[in-house]
Image (tube, rainbow, N blue to C red):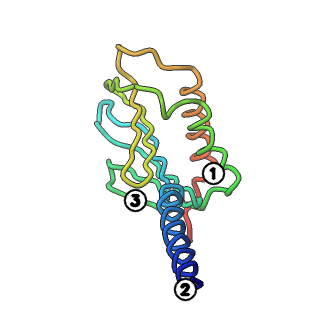
């Protein structure tokens, strides 16, 4: 009887530990927020990649240069990613590219949320404009090259 109970408890422990790993898997996957703009007369792309660990990269297509920048402060990064959800951007549908297109892409694992604006068709929420402006200020203030 004791062996049966030990076997049952072991089985329950194994099953519960497997489920916990599956549930936590999504939250452990790294997030990356890509933001920038593209188009205009030259058709160039100017974008930044901010990872949830503070890593920061700038890419400029006109010169085909990818530069690793100084890491962003962890508290700022945490706030940026939290605000994306709190402000409802994960629920927003916005795909209106124009001659000069601004965009945000939040990627976590296989999931990617893309917001594009700059065309004449969709009204851009003020909160999105302010969020994007703040991201560009972070980029401007953090634009020193990592050495």
Describe residue 121's horizontal placement relative to residue 31 as left or right.
Answer: left
Q: Residue at x 53, y 59 (%)?
A: 24
Q: Nearer the viewer, residue 85 or 50?
A: 85
Can you name the residue that lies furthest to the bottom here?
A: 3
Per the rendering, the mark at residue 66 is 3
Neighbor class of circle 3 (other Cα within 10 Å; few <14, some 14-19, many 20+) is few
Gap between marks 1 and 3 measured at Cα: 21 Å
Per the rendering, the mark at residue 69 is none
106 shown above or below 117: below
Gap between marks 3 and 2 measured at Cα: 61 Å
Q: Does dot 1 land on a helix, a strand or a loop?
A: helix
66 shown above or below 138: below
Location of mark 1 (residue): 77
Q: Residue at x 59, y 25 (%)?
A: 127
Q: Residue at x 42, y 42 (%)?
A: 105
Q: Position of residue 15 (x, y in %)?
A: 49, 68
Q: Position of residue 133 (x, y in %)?
A: 58, 33
Per the rendering, the mark at residue 3 is 2
The C terminus lies in quadrant: bottom right
Q: Does dot 2 land on a helix, a strand or a loop?
A: helix
């Amino acid at each position: 009887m004791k062996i049966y109970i030990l076997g049952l408890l072991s089985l329950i422990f194994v099953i519960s530990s497997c489920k916990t790993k599956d549930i936590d898997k999504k939250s452990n996957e790294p997030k990356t927020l890509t933001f920038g703009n593209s188009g205009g007369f030259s058709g160039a792309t100017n974008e930044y990649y901010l990872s949830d660990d503070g890593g920061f990269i700038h890419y400029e297509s006109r010169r085909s240069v990818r530069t690793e920048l100084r890491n962003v402060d962890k508290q700022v990064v945490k706030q940026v990613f939290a605000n994306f959800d709190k402000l409802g951007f994960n629920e927003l549908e916005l795909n209106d590219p124009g001659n000069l297109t601004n965009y945000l892409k939040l990627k976590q694992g296989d999931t990617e949320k893309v917001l594009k604006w700059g065309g004449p068709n969709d009204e851009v929420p003020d909160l999105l404009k302010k969020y994007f402006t703040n991201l560009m200020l972070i980029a401007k203030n953090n634009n020193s090259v990592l050495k």
